[in-house]
Amino acid sequence: MKTPDHAWPGVNTRSPINGFECRRQHNFTQPLKLPPYAKRLREVLTVPSTWPQYAGTSADGRHPQLWVLAGSNTWNVAREYARGRYLFLACPPDADPEALDWRLLAGHDPVLLRQCGQLDGDTLKRLVLAVLRDGAERVLYLPEDGPVRRYIRAGCEVEYASA
């Protein structure tokens, strides 16, 4: 399903978004910072034999489910997820999502983006674009209320559909 023009007001998501291209757009003189919980996630991803113990991993154990937590209550939910069986990264409420390195998520589609408390539309947009920029092909956004939204990176385009 193609993106309705109202998905992000003023943005046509059927074409490249605000100059978004299939390459990283940041100043390479300063490396991007890893999001919280990246070290833990990296350690788990290097040992595929451990994947089946985590929530959402495919039945054959070859495809772990990765989450991104974002919103005003991110830290509380992250502590809960860290005690549980989840593989995730956190986007701190005060962070610029575009300044974080989301490459650990690449190749683990779809990435589930969970809203944790208030999450404004601009932050959501920048987070989805940053995750897609860094190699994820599909993001499923799980708002606290309302339908699941799917974002797809196809070439340089991002499409939106209700799941």
Image (cartoon, helix red, strand yellow):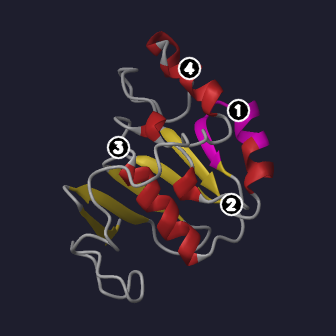
On the picture, is 102 further left or further right than 40?
left
In the picture shown, does residue 48 fall above or below 159?
A: above
Q: Nearer the viewer, mark 3 or mark 1?
A: 3
Please, what secondary structure does the residue beneath circle 2 have?
Answer: loop
Mark nearer the N terminus (4 vs 1): 4
Mark nearer the N terminus (3 vs 1): 1
In the picture shown, does residue 112 fall above or below 149?
A: above
Please, what secondary structure does the residue beneath circle 3 have?
Answer: loop
Q: In the rendered structure, are the residues bearing label 2 and label 4 in contact, judged by CB atoms less than 8 Å apart? A: no
Give the class, few, some or many, for how many residues have Cα within 10 Å of label 3's Cα (few <14, many ≥20). many
In the picture shown, does residue 37 fall above or below 146?
A: above
Q: Nearer the viewer, residue 91 or 23?
A: 23
Q: CA distance from mark 3 to mark 1?
A: 26 Å
Is 149 a magenta residue? no
Q: CA distance from mark 3 to mark 4?
A: 19 Å
Q: Quadrant of the N terminus?
A: bottom left
Seen at 25% across and 69% down, the residue is: 16
Where residue 91 appears, as percent x and y from the top left, is 64, 52
Q: In the rendered structure, are the residues bearing label 4 and label 1 in contact, judged by CB atoms less than 8 Å apart? A: no
What number is the disc on residue 84? Answer: 1
Seen at 30% across and 50% down, the residue is: 23
Q: Which residue is mark 4?
A: 44
Q: In the rendered structure, are the residues bearing label 3 and label 4 in contact, judged by CB atoms less than 8 Å apart? A: no
Amino acid type indicated by mark 4: Val
Please, what secondary structure does the residue beneath circle 4 have?
Answer: helix
**Segment tinted magenta in the rendering:** 79-90
Mark nearer the N terminus (3 vs 2): 2
What number is the disc on residue 135? Answer: 3
Amino acid type indicated by mark 2: Cys
Q: Which residue is mark 2?
A: 116
